[in-house]
Amino acid sequence: MIYRRLNPSEALKEIVKEYWVYENENPEIKREKIIPDGYSEIIIHYKSPYRIHINGNWEMQSAILFSNQISSYFFLENTGSSGMIGIKLHPVSFYELFGGEMSSYTDHVVPLEEIIPKKSIHLIEALNREIGIPTKILSIDRWITSQARVISKMRIAVDRILETNGLIDIQKLAIEGGQSLRSFERKFKKVVGVSPKFYSRIIRFSKIFHKIRSEDHSWVSLALQSGYFDQAHFIKNFKEFTGEEPSKYGFNEKNLANFFLIK
């Protein structure tokens, strides 16, 4: 079983947060829980496909997918040996590269060719030509570099939320951007996929995974340091995103959720 993170080229650091690779030759079926982390991704399956349970039914996934923001956990199952490359994008990058209404893809994992049929063909062709992970990553780098890009004004707001671990007043963000609160919320949801308030909640929640591994704190102390009003509020938020109470969650388990959230 292999989990790896790879940095994008210098030219793509504002677009791609990181690449990740997951490989597992064991064909035994394993159910994985995926938890919100605040980033959108393009995911390439180069071995057996996966099944997904996100909107009430189990469905077979296609080889190349786009996953936007998710509001709660969902499940995946392998159907054989696993091989995945993930392109973890800055939260506004997909919109900047391809446009569209990002809220349409929230809580959905969609075949990439359904969203950008012509542009995805070039990526599929490039990946099919390559065998090794390094050359596939290089092809992805080149494909992203070849796309036209328009910088969104929401990038600054999203970066402010990330920098403050979700602890920033949304009204203040709207004022800084010279917009009314209603206009700011509408545009943010279009570009990112969820409201700025909900996105801040995801980022605040995700930072718990950094703190829990780097420091030894009680749940009360951890809740207060993470910006929660009290322990009960913290537990409620944690359970909403993971389906489990923090005291019962396996922070040390080797699984995809922890790989994505614990650095």
Image (spheres, rainbow, N blue to C red):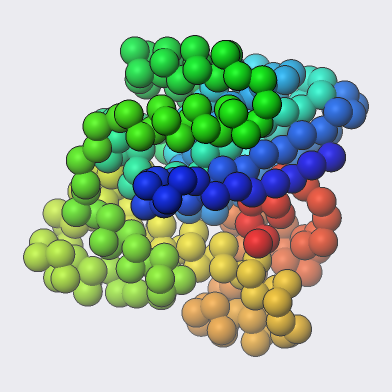
Instruction: Give the x, y percent position of residue 178.
Output: 9, 65
Q: Is residue 56 visible?
A: no
Q: Is residue 146 visible?
A: yes
Instruction: Give the x, y percent position of residue 184.
Output: 19, 57
Quadrant containing the C terminus in the rendered view: bottom right
Q: Closer to the camera, 106 or 177?
A: 177
Instruction: Give the x, y percent position of residue 172.
Output: 22, 74
Task: Please report the residue visible at 58 percent of the width from the left and 27 percent of the height from the top.
Answer: 136
100 displayed left or right of 232? left
Q: Closer to the camera, 220 or 258?
A: 258
Q: Quadrant of residue 222?
A: bottom right
Above or below — where is 170 with respect to 117? below
Task: Please report the residue visible at 64 percent of the width from the left and 24 percent of the height from the top.
Answer: 45
28 displayed left or right of 201? right
Q: Quadrant of residue 234?
A: bottom right
Instruction: Give the x, y percent position of residue 54.
Output: 59, 32
